[in-house]
Image (spheres, rainbow, N blue to C red):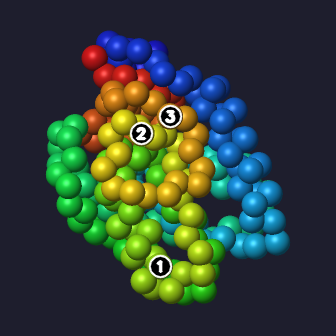
Amino acid sequence: MKYCNEIKQVLFSAEQIRERVCRMAEQISADYKGKRPLVIGVLKGAWVFVADLLREMDIPADVDFICASSYGSGTTTSGTVTLLKDITLDCRKRDVLIVEDIIDSGVTLSLLKQMMLDRKAKSVNIVTLLSKPSRRKADVDVKYVGFEIPDEFVVGYGMDYDERFRTFADIGILK
Ligand code: IMP
Ligand code: MG
């Protein structure tokens, strides 16, 4: 297994992730039937999730990416969010779905959601593969959650520690 010397425990295997992503895609497709949402993936962590989720959805969707960072190179939040790359599509009057890899404090997502509402999106909902509810600081309503996890730093399936492990197919806890 790639990176196996550095992973303490696999939390979700690639197969378990695929199952859950398929169920989430079904749910979102049903909720957005007849619509064409604008999906905004939050880089870099959500890149794998966005690709898998959107290909499983059976409704059309437009896709764009935003890059926001509330982390330096460590594992603790800095409390502020820096916008490193904005979307290029217009979100006015669109049904926006913000797609994240993981919600920790919720600071990033609450600010991004407000930003899209300020830009006059018709609706804004949040999709996250993982959530650490015990770490929440910002009050943010998350409509779709893949898995709730304990307060551990996880990597893989797009998520990194200092830019490493993004290409690990499972999701694991670092040693
Ligand atoms: P928040 O603003 O504190 O919710 O930060 C969320 C962002 O921090 C996520 O989009 C991730 O990029 C990053 N993050 C939070 N927890 C983890 C983790 O356990 N592993 C990898 N990245 C994480
Ligand atoms: Mg992220």
Q: What amino acid is labelled 2 in the image?
A: Pro
Q: Secondary structure at mark 2?
A: helix
The x, y position of residue 89, in whole percent, is 51, 81
Q: Is residue 41 left or right of residue 104?
A: right
Q: Secondary structure at mark 1?
A: helix
User: In the image, what residue occupies the spot 72% across and 41% down?
Assistant: 23
Residues marked 1 and 2 touching at CB (< 8 Å) = no
Q: What amino acid is labelled 3 in the image?
A: Glu
Disc 3 versus disc 1: distance between alpha carbons? 26 Å
Q: What amino acid is labelled 1 in the image?
A: Leu
Q: Quadrant of the C terminus?
A: top left
Up the image or down, 155 lies above or below 113; here it is above
Disc 1 versus disc 2: distance between alpha carbons? 24 Å
Disc 2 versus disc 3: distance between alpha carbons? 7 Å
Residue beneath label 3, please? 148
Graded by Cα atoms within 10 Å as few (under 14), some (14 to 19) or many (20 or more), the crowding at tag 2 reads some
Up the image or down, 163 lies above or below 110; here it is above
**Do we see residue 100 in this rendering?**
yes
Up the image or down, 11 lies above or below 143; here it is above
Residue beneath label 2, please? 133
The x, y position of residue 45, in whole percent, is 40, 48
The x, y position of residue 166, in whole percent, is 39, 38
Residue beneath label 1, please? 117
User: In the image, what residue occupies the spot 35% across and 14% down?
Assistant: 8
The x, y position of residue 90, in whole percent, is 52, 85
Residue 69 sits in which quadrant?
Answer: bottom left
N-terminal label among 2 and 3: 2
- Considering depth in this image, is 123 or 156 the residue closer to the camera? 123
Q: Is residue 139 left or right of residue 24?
A: left
Residues marked 2 and 3 touching at CB (< 8 Å) = yes
Whether ligand 1 has any atom under 8 Å from the Cβ at mark 1 is answered as no
Q: Secondary structure at mark 3?
A: strand
